[in-house]
Amino acid sequence: MSNCISNCNSCSSTSCAPVESKGGVVNSKGQLENSSTTNACKVCAPLGASLVFKGIRGCIPLVHGSQGCATYIRRYVISHFREPLDIASSNFTEAATVFGGQSNFELSIKNIINQYKPEVIGIATTCLSETIGDDVSMFVKNFRKKNLGMENMPKFVTASTASYQGSHMEGFHTAVKGIVCDLAEKPLETTDKVNIFPGFVSAEDLRQVKQIFEDFELEYIMVPDYSETMDSPTWNEYHKLPPGGVPAEEIGLVSSSTHSVEFGYIINKGHLDPISAAEHLEDRYGVTRHNMGLPIGIKETDKFFEALETISGKDTPDKYKQQRGRLVDSYIDGHKYLFGKKAVVYGEEDFVLSMVSFLEEIGIETIVAGTGGESGMLTSHIRDLGTANSKDILVKQGVDFEQLDQIAHELKPDLFIGNSKGYYIARKLSVPIVRCGFPIHDRIGAQRVMHLGYEGTQQLYDKICNAMMEYKQDNSPVGYKYV
Ligand code: SF4
């Protein structure tokens, strides 16, 4: 039975019909256009929401839909973070599909409470439960009413995440907004805390951003914070709910903070909800919002540090001035290896946007900027960068890897920059690939790849330079020891 109508071909769920053919239609210019997605350049929406829920202390994600959805998400996330990950499923059968999933929902909530005793249950819907119109907020209310006085009643947060309405990024940002709306309390008095909405970044990035806030002596509430839950030290005993994550009570105080720092220009604004969590807090509670791109590259990272200087009233600590200075110095050192090289960049929209800006700084020409996201906003944001070649970049939104393969074959790039799903194309073209973003399934340490800040940019920069130098060395008939 095929329940999934997202056609994203991003999962192997039993309820999702994988599209295996390269079915297509010929357009008015005689070009073949795919009518189906083959190797999607995105992942499914409840995956993003599940990761957000893992960033709340004592939270267990519940995927409301078929078992295959939860299994697919677990496989994908575990393979990237290399951490155990429990995700519950309300385990739809044919009966739930026809009559609605409320009884499955209630049974799964009871099982979760008995087995995990969570502080919070984060519920993400799926293509199927959204299509049949399950009202999860009402299910939660009914469950609470029916179980008044129940011991260990957790808090509930919900996210509406049908994959045919968006990618893992829409799922991620919808869940962030959902938990802020569900948990934020009416502020009694303003605190000096700063909210951080970092977006979908690596565990190491989260640690690095927290360190920067601490060095500015700013107290913060990071939503979500999966820096420990998705990258833990070894344990002597298995923790059903790993330590770490932001406590729900702290999320309740985001409305009392004076400022929010939010990374990403696009977030999920092209979709059903044009208001981000930080915008909501500004509109409703007057929390000043500082919005900037993911701080990759000097230009975007400078904006981040300028915002922190404004908020804290303090000068940037010397440690970061030194990092910036070393980064500029390395740009000069590596220029001869990178200048004029042509890159294909792909992944999430905000990641691609910041990467394009960074590549311009280091002399690499982005020839293709590809994303599976369909906000429709990436092209205008790239053009607005106003860089030397930003008007000439081929921006492909809603693209799949099949199309990227065809385009890259024609345009002959010197390197690929993005997640590991593009590896097979880089291999066919015999060009290097620099793995970053999500997912990375064919290397160790994806959760520790640093992208953000001067330090993260430095690491990305060194990786790109070394990839080009290694390529030159490997493809030379001469065994250069100096490159
Ligand atoms: S929610 Fe995701 S995994 Fe589930 S059917 Fe839709 S695309 Fe497939």
Image: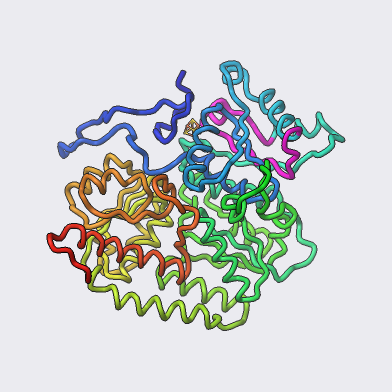
Q: In this view, does 325 lie above or below 139?
A: below
- Relative image position of residue 365 (x, y in whole percent): 25, 63
Q: Which residue is at a point 57% across and 52% down the rendered structure image?
A: 231
Q: Which colour scheme is used?
A: rainbow
Name the image quarter holding residue 132. top right
Q: Which residue is at a point 45% across and 21% down the rendered structure image?
A: 2
- Relative image position of residue 313 (x, y in whole percent): 62, 81
Name the image quarter holding residue 476. bottom left
Q: In this view, does 269 lie above or below 69?
A: below
| Magenta region, residue range | 114-137
- Relative image position of residue 12 (x, y in whole percent): 44, 30
Name of the residue lying farthest toward the left: 477
Q: Find out whether residue 89 is within the magenta segment.
A: no
Q: Which residue is at a point 23% across and 31% down the rendered structure image?
A: 25
468 displayed left or right of 321: left
Q: Find out whether residue 129 is within the magenta segment.
A: yes
